[in-house]
Amino acid sequence: MVCVGLGLGVVGCGASSTGSDSASTVATAGTHPVRTAEPETGGVRPPAAETATAGLAALPTTRRVTPAAAGYSRSAFGDSWIDTDRNGCNQRDDVLVRDAVPGTVRVAVQGRCDHDVLAGRWIDPYTGRDLRFDDLKDPAQAQGVQIDHVVPLAEAWVSGAAQWTDDRRRAFANDLAALLAVDGPTNASKRDGDPAAWRPKKAYQCDYAIRWIGVKQAWGLAVDESERRALTDMLGYCAS
C-alpha cells in the first residue's frame, strides 16, 4: 500500500473485520508497538514546515465539488477494516494501541489478534481532551474514542479517489499513517470537513496541516483554493 510521505512515518498497517469478543488472555500493551499520545504531535514527529509548504505548492488544484454532486458512496472504500499487514487485528485495534498513552492499554487475545483493545487512555490531538475508558466492549464507551480518517473519505473522493480502483480506495481507507485515534464527539463534528470548513485547536493546526498535506501528496490527491488558503494559514502557526 502507499504510505504517507513528508517524513510522517508509519507504524505498521493491519486490520480485519471485527469479530465477537472471545478474549482469553489479558495483558498490558507494553510488549506492543505503542507511542506516546501527545496533543501537539498527534503521535508522529512532523517534518519542517517548509517541507510541507513545498508539498502544498506541488499539489494540483481542483474545483470544489460536493461529495453528493460527485456521486460519493462510503461503500466505495470498503465496508469494514481490512488486515493490510496480516497481523490478525482490525485497524481500529492497531490505531488504538499505537496512539494510546504508554502503559495504559489493556488488551486481550481474540482469535488471531493478540491486541484486541479492552481499555486505556488517549489524549485527543484535536482538542487535548484526556480520554479514559475501562470497558471498550461497552458500545457507549467505544463511541467515545473513534478512528478518524484525517482526510475524510468523502473529501478524498472529490479530490481524486473517484477515479481510483476499488482496491486502491480500500488501501487508502486503511492507511495507518492517515488514521488517528480521537475524541468521538469531535470526530462527529468534523464529519467530512476539509481545513476550510473545520480546524482542530490552534496548538495542533500546524501539525494537522502537515499531516493533511502529507496524506494528499502520498496519495496524489488535489486541493481546492479555499482548502489551500486554509492550509497555508495553519502552516503559519508552525514554529520557525
Image: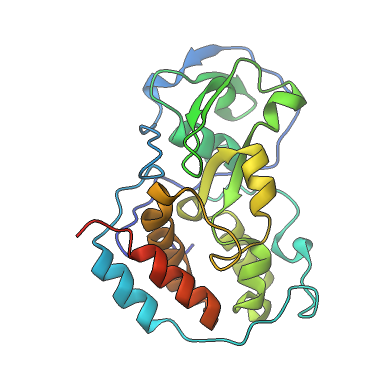
**Count of residue discs:** 0
Q: Residue at x 38, y 42 (%)?
A: 43
Which residue lies at the image location 38% right of the left edge and 24% below the top edge?
A: 102
Is residue 166 placed above or below 25 in the rendered structure? below
Q: Where residue 190 sits: x, y (%)?
A: 64, 53
Say if 164 sits above or below 45 in the image.
below
Estimate the x, y position of residue 169 in percent, counting from the top left: 63, 67
163 left or right of 14? right
Taking 178 as reference, is 20 above or below it?
above
Q: Quadrant of the C terminus?
A: bottom left
Does the image show residue 90? no
Residue 29 spot, x, y in % from top left: 44, 21
The part of the image, by quadrant, that contains residue 50 is bottom left
Q: Residue at x 76, y 53 (%)?
A: 79
Residue 58 visible, this orientation:
yes
On screen, residue 17 versus residue 213, left or right, reads right
Q: Quadrant of residue 73?
A: bottom right
Location of residue 33 in the rendering, given as x and y in whole percent from the top left corner: 38, 32
Q: Residue furthest left?
A: 240
- In this rendered view, identify the residue nearer to me: 78 or 65: 65
Vertical placement of 222 versus 11: above or below? below
Left or right: 172 as drawn, with respect to 43: right
Pick the front one: 1 or 226: 226
For the rendered model, the colour scheme is rainbow
